[in-house]
Amino acid sequence: METHFKSWAAVAPRLVAVAAGREKADLVIRGGKLVNVQTREILDGWQVAVAEGRFAYIGPDASHCVGDETRVIEAESRYLIPGLCDGHMHIESGMLTPAEFAAAVIPHGTTTMFTDPHEIANVLGLRGVRMMHDEALMQPVNIYTQMPSCAPSAPGLETTGFEISAEDVAEAMAWPGIIGLGEMMNFPGVINGDPQMLAEMAATMNAGKTVGGHYASPDKGVAFSAYVAGGAADDHEGTAEADAIARVRNGMRSMMRLGSAWYDVESQITAVTEKGLDPRNFILCTDDCHSGTLVNEGHMNRVVRHAIACGCDPVVALQMATINTATHFGLEREIGSIAPGRRADMILTSDLVTLPIEEVIARGQTVAKDGKITVECPHYDWPADARETVHMGKVLDDADFAINAPEGKNKVKAKVIGVVENQAPTEALTAELPVVDGLVEGEGDTYQIALVERHQGTGKVVNGFVSGFGYTGKMAMASTVAHDSHHMIVVGTDRAMMAAAANRLGEVGGGVTVWKDGEELALVELPIAGLMSDSPAAQVAAKADQMVAAMAACGCTLNNAYMQHSLLALVVIPSLRISDLGLVDVDKFEITDIFEENA
């Protein structure tokens, strides 16, 4: 499908001719300092010649490549660095389609993304993945797609809109933009030799592609060894130095993430900066960034700056966001460095520490300058059924959110999902809660959580308790972004308001809404699969900012609390979650009762 960009084989004769001086380059950059991530050198005065969107020559003097029609950029002593690569991410987390996500991150210097669209896979199945894949290939930068591996993420613990089969994985491996298998979240399945999980990984390896990992257990013993033996080549779920070390010692790449809510670089990069491990096996990524982060703070440039601030050498940090990533996915000859034959993806910056992104070049064309995008990012024609995915089955009322107490009880000991700031895992807490008129009520910082089934229109609502957001007064927040099954998650202190919030999302076809004292304070419409908007990132970010402000007005004190809200149904990360089948004890990988026994 990538018809607008020619392969190396198609343009090799011209690259050779330009490098030899027989033909002239399309673009030459001179007067700069080339950051060579192959050798970890800064080569002052080296020049770059580009033809057909690829590097033809790098060296001390490219004058033999300059002709009358050659565009010349004077770098004025600035650094030339490779375009930045995000080694693991989910476009849907930005609340944006691939086109609008690309438009948001290109000015920040991201020229390559490795994306796992397992969010849309849970809602629209293989067809939804194909839509994401096809829009990705339309963009002026490189967006590679990993075929989702786990929909549902944990069979038997949740029900999704669609399921992904081993046959689906094998089919997708032949698509032009598929680079590998998305994160293998069903780590108990792999460890126990589940035939489908092993078949998916075998289909990926038989296609010569990379298996993405996701090992969210603290157990680094036999279980971890069994998981690695299953074929996962990387892992982004580490949160401590020991996690990073265990990954690389077992031949995996340690992907260290800085997303909107995940701060896992600082705690792991010491494996390189203090323990002195080989940095080429470490990769930087974002995993999940919402639109507000992209617009206001940045993307991979933000991660590289953070790694440098954590004590990492700037060029080593750049390697972790360029050549290391390219090598991992078997694309070292295509992207990730400024070297002959590679795609001409690079950034001009005046400082390697603060990393201002002054000009971004992708495939030899300037795509952003001084923070402004200079190219178009084409949109896919999303069909009507991709915009009509919220099927609740009925209008909800406060009775749907009632939690009946065991007979004869005037107080109960309930299991509570405990949110942990800036981390994906939750705590499994308990709380003594009062019973009023036969119904269990939240108290203090413990309030209700509900999952509303939205794929099949069953009208089912599963209720439980959650704490940690800091909510006060009468409020409710509802979202159709609920990793990974993407049913609807509602958290609130008032049952009537929870019903109002849920019904509102049914009206608009998905998104996020926040209510307080009977009124809607914020609404982010996400009409595509209930996950994404095809509006520009700045518009979505403005509505997301209103959402964050509305959550704060309801008493929320957490950093990036929306991301925590969206993960409350993620039944593959410890310790306690909610699904359409009930409360899930992820440590045991089983459904558990909402009340403590014998309490």
Image (cartoon, helix red, strand yellow):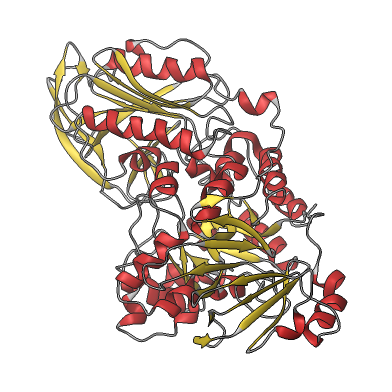
Q: Nearer the viewer, residue 13 or 557?
A: 13
The spot of residue 222 in percent (x, y) is: 42, 72
Give residue 211's quadrant in the image: bottom right
Residue 164: % across, % down: 65, 44
Residue 190 found in image quarter: bottom right
Is residue 532 something one can see in this rendering? yes
Q: Residue at x 54, y 88 (%)?
A: 39
Asked whether 271 or 348 is in front, the reply is: 348
In the image, 419 versus 307, the foreground residue is 307
Report the number of discs: 0
The C terminus - image quarter: top left
Q: Is residue 322 left or right of residue 246?
A: right
Residue at 15%, 19% in the rendered image: 435
User: Is residue 307 depicted above or below 203 in this figure?
Assistant: below
The answer to which of 293 and 150 lies nearer the viewer is: 293
Residue 316: percent from left, percent from top: 44, 79
* Direction front: furthest residue: 68
Q: Position of residue 517 (x, y in %)?
A: 23, 14
Please state if 378 lies on the left or on the right of 460 as rendered.
right
Quarter residue 399 falls in: top left
- The answer to whether residue 481 of the structure is visible from this angle is no
- Horizontal arrangement in the rendering, residue 52 relative to residue 302 (left or right): right
- Looking at the picture, does residue 582 appear above or below residue 336? above
The residue at the point 58 percent across, 58 percent down is 113
